[in-house]
Amino acid sequence: MELKLTTWNINSVRLRLPIVSAFLQEHAPDVLCLQEIKCLNDQFPFKPLRELGYEHIAVHGQKGYHGVAIVSRLPLGEGFSTDYCAMGDTRHIAAVIDVGGRKIRLHNFYVPAGGDEPDPDINPKFRHKLDFLEEMKALRADAGDGVSSILVGDLNIAPMEHDVWSHKQLLKVVSHTPVETETMQELIAAGGWTDLMRYVTPEDEKLYTWWSYRAKDWRAANRGRRLDHIWSSADLVPAFSRFEILADARGWEKPSDHVPVTGYFSL
């Protein structure tokens, strides 16, 4: 059985419902994890998504900011969310899915962006981001309960040299500073995670999932970053067959600055 799982920072699910619906109809993932939905739970567009066959929906929303959701054809069980840094932000949601008798705990994250200045002493947003990542280190891929794990989301860090358009020029830009990239590698190691997109892609191959709104012609400039991730516990690594970055979505009407990233697991 194949599991087709998509992660997408949608930057307002209600504003961009037409492209979400079009994506689901054309690409039909089993599970869609959304970040930055920017709405309260009761404002989420349950009805139109359920009419498309996605009957199982878990939402952790917030008025006008943040917010995460899991939209699924598969039943969702054992759901919970964690309030990282005790800020009251809605940046994490988890649920268990059953794929051919195999239980998988799915974590969906929206890590703080961190503001513009990469100095935690003068920028509280950057301090918040680093503290959030430190707390994420306690999250183990192998929870010891026989359930496999997948972690997806907008993690707001492009960790590798070729995850950005210019490693040299972005070393002092939030999302690619050494303190962020090193902390992410520590987080991956501490939790026993595998960065699946890089596991199946040579390190010298460029991978981008985000292109700034500031670029007049994003495709021609191609100054992207890989901010969106798919990780898993070690037992799922052999099952991961491939991924797709739907770059064309950046050119859709009223697009998000992030594009859908879909991972395929043969289970």
Image: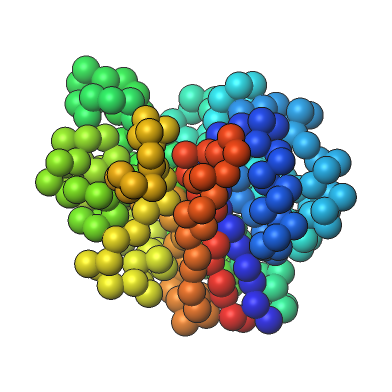
Does any portion of residue 103 appear in the rendered image?
A: yes
**Foreground pick, 233 / 10:** 10
**Foreground pick, 12 / 184:** 12
Q: Position of residue 127 (x, y in %)?
A: 30, 27
In the displayed structure, would residue 65 be above or below residue 185?
A: above
Q: Quadrant of residue 101?
A: bottom right
Relative horizontal placement of residue 215, taking residue 34 as reference (left or right): left
Q: Residue at x 58, y 58 (%)?
A: 6
- Which residue occupies the extreme top position in the image? 122
**Foreground pick, 157 / 247:** 247
In the displayed structure, would residue 229 be above or below residue 156?
A: below
Q: Residue at x 34, y 47 (%)?
A: 220
Q: Residue at x 34, y 59 (%)?
A: 207
Relative horizontal placement of residue 216, taking residue 144 as reference (left or right): left
Q: Position of residue 199 (x, y in %)?
A: 35, 72
Q: Quadrant of the C terminus?
A: bottom right
Does any portion of residue 61 appear in the rendered image?
A: no
Q: Position of residue 31 (x, y in %)?
A: 67, 59
